[in-house]
Amino acid sequence: MNSIFAKLKKHFSMRLKIFEFNAFQVNTILVYDESGECVIIDAACYIESEKKEIIDFIENESLKPVKLLFTHCHVDHILGWNTISEYFKIDAEIHKAALPFLDEAVERGLAFGFSIAPINKPTTFLEDGDIIKFGKTALTVLYTPGHADGSVCFVNDESRQVIVGDVLFRGSIGRTDLPTGDFQVLKKSIHDRLFTLPEDYEAFPGHGSSTTIGYEKMNNPFVGVG
């Protein structure tokens, strides 16, 4: 009987598809399960081939996007905001503290060589502790400022995975020398919100490869406690 329940749980387990987009190599993460519903986190597709890649994957897999979420609103992470929102007719959701980044997105984009239209402002905002439900999956929102105001992480306890944006990287942390960055605030976010998760939870950052909470607790030179 236990094996039957295990197979059923696996059948509906959360799945991730990671795309690496734009010159900053941002990880856009598509989260879905066997229901066919999906959410898109950090839509960073910029050039036409990148936009086509993620749209083709969604349509070829017969997925239905129901949420467009952002871990934070630095311009490299939001380059595909308007494209994905308009194509799939879904509104974006962010933490309200990230709103000021949208006002300067066009100017910031130009500074890095990106030409983007003004961002369609969200009407729904994420709050710490929110449970985002879609299909058979639930993501818990953790508010984790320090790299940027409005930074959030998304935890799925069933799959023991957490999407951490630019808060934490394998062997590193997000920059704190950009507007609203603060090392002490970031360190507290990591220690209080991420390092309190079980050590086997796999963490998927906004750039680079995945890691585990346990590995970073023991080995991270900036915030490790090992």
Image: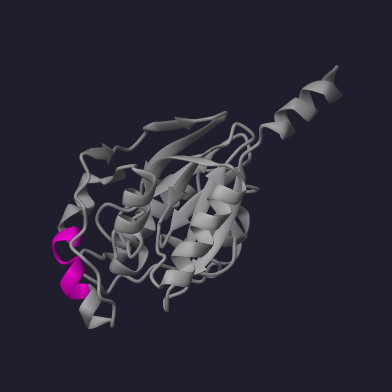
Q: Residue furthest top?
A: 1
Quarter of the N terminus within the rendering: top right
Q: In which quarter of the image is residue 122?
A: top left
Instruction: Give the percent coordinates (x, y) of residue 17.
Output: 59, 54
Residue 9 screen position, x and y as percent? 71, 29
- The part of the image, by quadrant, that contains residue 32 is top right
- Of residue 152 and residue 19, the one placed in the foreground of this image is 19
Question: Image point 29% across, 37% down: which residue?
Answer: 127
Q: Main secondary structure of the magenta part?
A: helix
- The C terminus lies in quadrant: bottom right
Give yes or no for residue 105 being in the magenta stretch: yes
Seen from the viewer's position, the closer of residues 212 and 41 is 41
Name the residue at 38% across, 70% down.
Answer: 46
Q: How many labels does the image show?
A: 0
Vertically, is 22 above or below 71? below
Between residues 121 and 185, which one lies in front from this camera angle? 121
Left or right of residue 116, residue 66 in this image? right
Q: Is residue 73 magenta?
A: no
Q: Is residue 226 visible?
A: no
Which residue is nearer to you in this view: 183 or 103? 103
Residue 82 horizontal side relative to residue 156, left or right: left
Q: What segment is highlighted magenta in the picture? A: 101-108
Q: Where residue 113 appears, x then y in whole percent?
A: 28, 83
Q: In this view, does 18 lie to the left or right of 40?
A: right
Colour scheme employed for the rendering of this structure = one colour
Q: Is residue 58 visible?
A: yes
> Is 157 drawn above or below residue 187 in the view shown?
above
Instruction: Residue 168: give x, y in percent of width and height.
Output: 46, 61
Q: Residue at x 59, y 61 (%)?
A: 210
Identified at 28% across, 81% down, the residue is 112
